[in-house]
Image (tube, rainbow, N blue to C red):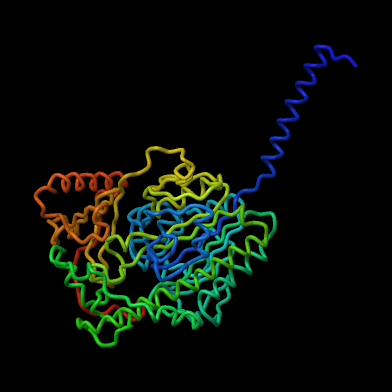
């Protein structure tokens, strides 16, 4: 058969159309990625062994996510407090914008979140575990098909949950209970529909109680107070005033020390016991991550799942004489972050640039191809991981507001650049700051041992950082920058119900 020009033209059109329909079919069958988001509470960035900073605590299952995906070496929260940070994770905006500035405020019901956006796009959604926005509310929140949480902090053993409308005590160790709920939900979800599973652990939040098999894991490890606990000469006075409080190393240490204040050398034993228990709770979380990984693999969904593991904020463990969080010092603001998804990167990567809790919502929506949250302060790290962005942030700002319920930390405003940190403590009424500023070269002094604020050679750098901090606050829409009045460091213990 001879082909004429007309035949050849028709054949060419047919081939083009066939290729076009083929491409459409491929696009139509390509599945949107699922999302599994594991969130721990008060976990330090250096308590995953992929960090290279955890000589005793090993986390092979968490590490595997980073070893097969992305490890973010410099991940930070923008407010080191549970509820504000969680609200920033959901919304992509600073605490002053979403309004959850303490641990007693609900996430605004009319505020968009990445789970709501995914839900609107057809995702099946579940939240299981510690929600921690609204102390006395365990009801389902907008954007979720399935919701299992509890009031307040929850307990390490035998917590009463509201499981999708039914309240009941779920016996057993918290980490196992929420993992079982998550595994069951994954198994029972409708097939063929993309899903979002958020799993909120209690661990390793105080009070620290490991399960029995891990209760003695670190008994052989000596845990001295950090060196910076005794390098306070150039620190603000409020840091020294905090030493014997609920948030100081000579205080009750979340009830691990019964007689306090204890400034004796022997008092370090209670500090050791507290730290060992903290590490023990993380071992159970690592087991949980391994179970979820295997479940996704068994379901055939592992490589089509954006698997994120992170914490809501960091934790001071003796640094600068402090325990707890809230301050702008490195252990308080740094969080662990590993991400696995072959659609994001085919080969393992380590990201050095600074990423923030504000970036989760934009990143997840970008990777899932589901719109965006208008007005988000964060940005997607998808192009950063894929090497498609050259102008990533080199500076950001931190905000924390004084709490009457926990009067151990002043108002904090700080800027953190790639190499520097400047911290100031506004009084709250527009008057001059009542506390000494802090300035650190975090490149050469990562432990923040030497406060450079009074060094003559640092005057220009201080002025530069102060101006940049003011600019960042203004750019984020926080002018006027509202905050409560700093009523000073106080010694009384917090109410038992909110510890």
Q: Picture coordinates of residue 397 (x, y %)?
A: 29, 51
- Say how many tags the image has: 0
Spot occupied by residue 83 in the image (x, y as percentages of width and height): 39, 64
Residue 107 placement, left or right of 65: left
Work out whether residue 352 or residue 131 is closer to the camera in this orientation and state it.
352
Which residue is outermost to the top? Answer: 5
Q: Residue furthest left?
A: 456
Q: Find residue 242 and report its image quarter.
A: bottom left
Position of the N terminus, as image quadrant, is top right
Which residue is nearer to you in this view: 430 or 437? Answer: 437
Q: Which image quadrant is residue 84 in?
A: bottom left
x and y percentages locating residue 257 in the rendered image: 29, 84
State the residue at coordinates (35%, 79%): 274
The vertical placement of 447 against 203, above or below, is above
Residue farthest right in this picture? 1
Is residue 155 positioned above or below 144 on the image?
Answer: below
Is 258 left or right of 361, judged from the image as shown? left
Q: Is residue 184 visible?
A: yes
Please state the horizontal and vertical placement of residue 32, each as a whole percent of the image.
61, 48
At 72% from the left and 30% from the top, the residue drawn is 19
Q: Is residue 405 above or below residue 459?
A: below
Q: Looking at the rendering, in which quadrant would you find the C terminus?
A: bottom left
User: Does the rendering let one see residue 344?
Assistant: no
Q: Is residue 180 above or below residue 400?
A: below
* Residue sticking out furthest to the bottom: 259
């Amino acid at each position: 058969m001879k082909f004429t020009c007309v035949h050849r033209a028709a054949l060419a059109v047919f081939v083009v159309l066939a290729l076009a329909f083929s491409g459409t079919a491929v696009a139509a069958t390509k599945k949107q990625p699922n999302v599994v988001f594991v969130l721990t509470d008060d976990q330090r960035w250096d308590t995953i062994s992929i960090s290279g900073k955890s000589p005793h605590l090993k986390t092979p299952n968490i590490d595997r996510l980073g070893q097969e995906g992305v490890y973010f070496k410099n991940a930070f929260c923008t407010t080191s407090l549970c509820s504000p940070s969680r609200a920033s994770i959901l919304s992509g905006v600073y605490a002053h914008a979403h309004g959850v500035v303490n641990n007693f405020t609900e996430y605004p019901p009319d505020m968009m979140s990445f789970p709501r956006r995914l839900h609107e796009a057809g995702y099946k959604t579940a939240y299981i575990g510690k929600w921690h926005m609204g102390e006395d509310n365990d009801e389902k929140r907008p954007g979720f098909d399935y919701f299992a949480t509890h009031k307040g902090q929850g307990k390490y053993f035998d917590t009463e949950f509201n499981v999708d409308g039914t309240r009941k005590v779920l016996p057993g160790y918290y980490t196992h209970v929420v993992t079982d709920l998550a595994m069951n939900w994954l198994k029972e979800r409708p097939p063929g529909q993309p899903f979002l599973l958020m799993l909120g652990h209690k661990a390793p939040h105080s009070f620290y109680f490991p399960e029995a098999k891990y209760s003695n894991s670190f008994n052989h490890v000596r845990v001295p107070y950090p060196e910076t606990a005794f390098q306070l000469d150039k620190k603000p006075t409020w840091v020294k005033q905090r030493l014997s409080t609920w948030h100081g190393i000579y205080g009750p240490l979340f009830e691990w020390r019964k007689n306090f204040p204890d400034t004796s050398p022997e008092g370090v034993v209670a500090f050791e016991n507290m730290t060992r228990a903290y590490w023990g709770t993380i071992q159970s979380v690592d087991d949980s991550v391994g179970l979820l990984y295997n479940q996704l693999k068994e379901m055939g969904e592992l490589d089509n799942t954006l698997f994120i593991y992170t914490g809501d904020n960091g934790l001071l463990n003796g640094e600068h004489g402090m325990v707890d969080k809230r301050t702008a010092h490195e252990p308080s603001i740094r969080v662990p972050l590993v991400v696995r998804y072959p659609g994001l990167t085919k080969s393992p990567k380590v990201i050095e640039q600074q990423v923030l809790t504000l970036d989760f919502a934009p990143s997840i929506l970008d990777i899932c191809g589901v719109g965006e949250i208008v007005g988000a302060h964060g940005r997607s790290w998808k192009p950063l991981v894929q090497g498609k962005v050259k102008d990533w942030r080199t500076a950001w700002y931190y905000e924390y507001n004084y709490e009457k319920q926990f009067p151990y930390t002043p108002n904090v405003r700080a800027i953190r650049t790639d190499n520097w940190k400047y911290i100031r403590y506004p009084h709250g009424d527009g008057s001059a700051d009542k506390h000494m500023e802090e300035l650190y070269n975090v490149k050469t002094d990562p432990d923040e041992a030497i406060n450079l604020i009074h060094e003559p050679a640092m005057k220009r750098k201080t002025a530069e950082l102060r101006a940049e901090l003011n600019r960042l606050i203004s750019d984020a829409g926080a002018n006027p920058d509202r905050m409560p009045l700093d009523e000073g460091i106080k010694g009384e213990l917090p109410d038992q119900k909110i510890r």
